[in-house]
Image (cartoon, grey):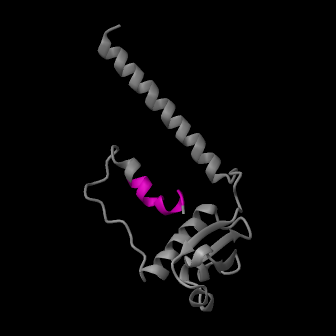
Amino acid sequence: MKPMTRAALVITATAALGGTSYRVITRRRRSGAAPAAGRRHVITVNRPLDEIAEVLPEPLNAYHGTIEVQLRAAPADRGTEISARALDDKVSDGDIRRLLRESRSLLEVGDVLQPGGPTTEPTALNSALRGATRHGREGGLL
């Protein structure tokens, strides 16, 4: 077998395996089989507790009744800890993480900063970056 034919075969097999793995993982996440569903998420905001306790930010108020929100002073006078947990299966962990990030941005900066628009037209090569930008606020460390 020629080296170019062998390389093409390896690349094709790797791409097929990666695509299949991605579809399996995506289905599991969408089916709600995540073991951490309904867990409590906590974020620290650089604002005093009495300032936040009066009125919660709009993203958290929009989900009133479907999430449980608790406030407490952060250790060493570093602001306020906001913790949130889903009360039912209607709100995902990713949604809660996004709500907490948007709330922190509103409380500290006064606006929710959005990533810039695309600098190129959508292609197959930049689809991973577009997906990461679209779902960036739902995952990762708070």
Q: Residue at x 49, y 63 (%)?
A: 137
Q: Residue at x 59, y 43 (%)?
A: 25
Q: Residue at x 54, y 58 (%)?
A: 141
Does the segment drawn in magenta span residue 9? no
In this picture, residue 87 sits left or right of residue 114: right
Between residue 65 and residue 55, name the one nearer to us. 55
Vertical arrangement, residue 12 with respect to residue 87, above or below = above
> x, y percentage for residue 34?
68, 51
In this picture, residue 59 sits left or right of residue 33: left
Q: Main secondary structure of the magenta part?
A: helix
The single residue placed furthest to the left in the displayed view is: 120
The single residue placed furthest to the bottom in the displayed view is: 54
Q: Quadrant of residue 6?
A: top left
Identify the image quadrant of the C terminus: bottom right
In this picture, residue 70 sits left or right of residue 21: right
Magenta span of residues: 130-141
Q: Residue at x 57, y 47 (%)?
A: 26
The single residue placed furthest to the top in the displayed view is: 1
> x, y percentage for residue 79?
56, 79
The single residue placed furthest to the front in the displayed view is: 76
Vertical arrangement, residue 80 with respect to residue 97, above or below = below
Does the segment drawn in magenta span residue 138? yes
